[in-house]
Image (cartoon, rainbow, N blue to C red):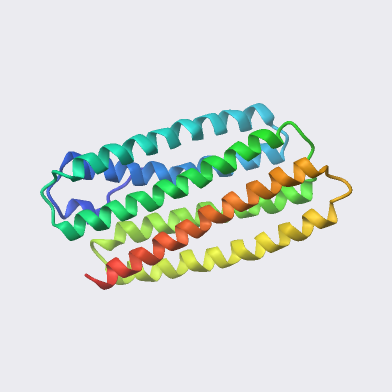
Amino acid sequence: MAKGSFAWFEKRRKTDALNLAQEQITKALGTVTLLHKAVQSASKEKKEEARNFIEKLSREEEEVDNLRRSAFKELTNVAVSVEFREDLMHLVKRLDVMADHVKDAARSILILLETSVPNEIWEVNLRVAEALVQSATALRSSIEKLGTDPVRAKEIVKEVNAIESRIDKDYLETKKLFIKHTRQVDPATLLILNNLLEFMEQAADMCADTADYIAILGSER
């Protein structure tokens, strides 16, 4: 996900804390794209390619953690209002949690590379991963609009929530597929597949939760 301008930040004096927070947000949302690529490669049995994406995702998520800690440390001294500092810290924390769920999903894929998964199950997981990218992209747009067009930011939040609803439907569809393939797939593999689904669904929930928070911030402006 390309790094862009966050007007919400740029309306205030540039500081190391704000730069760190902006980079953390960008990297956290970017982990979703790497997860999608990993699922795509795994579904095509391109195992080494999937491992490379997962390895890169792990490095990015570690950097997200480091940036969160650095941003929080710098924010204790930054010359911004208490309200803005709290808003920013809440936003950074939410996206850090989202990136944690994405990392856990990637770890599940890493295990699944060692076993056999029906194409039908990979396909629905790929659909969820694609929707997760769409959700993260919309969330980023809502953050970008927060400082210049809060009304539009709130409109984009509705898109994030709509995407989450689609993911919820695929979540239930995947659960049905677990039952359908219960004789074909061993219990241990089904357990890891369930973990993968749960982690992606949790990441989607965190995107929606963050979007709702953006809507609240937009209403205050």
Give the quarter of the image for residue 175.
bottom right
Counting from the top left corner in percent of width and height, residue 77 is at 13, 43
171 vs 185: above or below: below
Residue 81 is left or right of residue 177, and the answer is left
Compared across the picture, whether 13 is left or right of 92 comes to left
Question: With 179 as the anchor, is 67 left or right in this view?
Answer: left
Position of the N terminus by quadrant: top left
Residue 200, x across and y down, in percent: 58, 51
Whether residue 178 is visible, yes or no, is yes
Could you tell me which residue is drawn at 85 percent across and 51 percent down? 182
- Name the residue at 36% across, 45% down: 26
Relative depth, front residue between 16 and 72: 72
Q: Position of residue 25 (x, y in %)?
A: 35, 47
Q: Which residue is more in the foreground, 57 or 83?
A: 83
Q: Is residue 31 above or below residue 59?
A: below
Quarter of the rendering occupied by the C terminus: bottom left
Q: Is residue 19 above or below residue 168?
A: above
Q: Quadrant of residue 73?
A: top left
Residue drawn where x is 44% and y is 48% of the image: 97
> Number of numbered discs present?
0
Tell me which residue sits at (24%, 56%) in the image. 86
Q: Where residue 40 sits: x, y (%)?
A: 64, 42
- In the image, 186 versus 163, the foreground residue is 186
Can I make out residue 1 in this image?
no
Q: Nearer the viewer, residue 97 or 120?
A: 97
Please indicate whether residue 148 sits to the left or right of residue 138 in the image.
left
* Quarter holding residue 48: top right
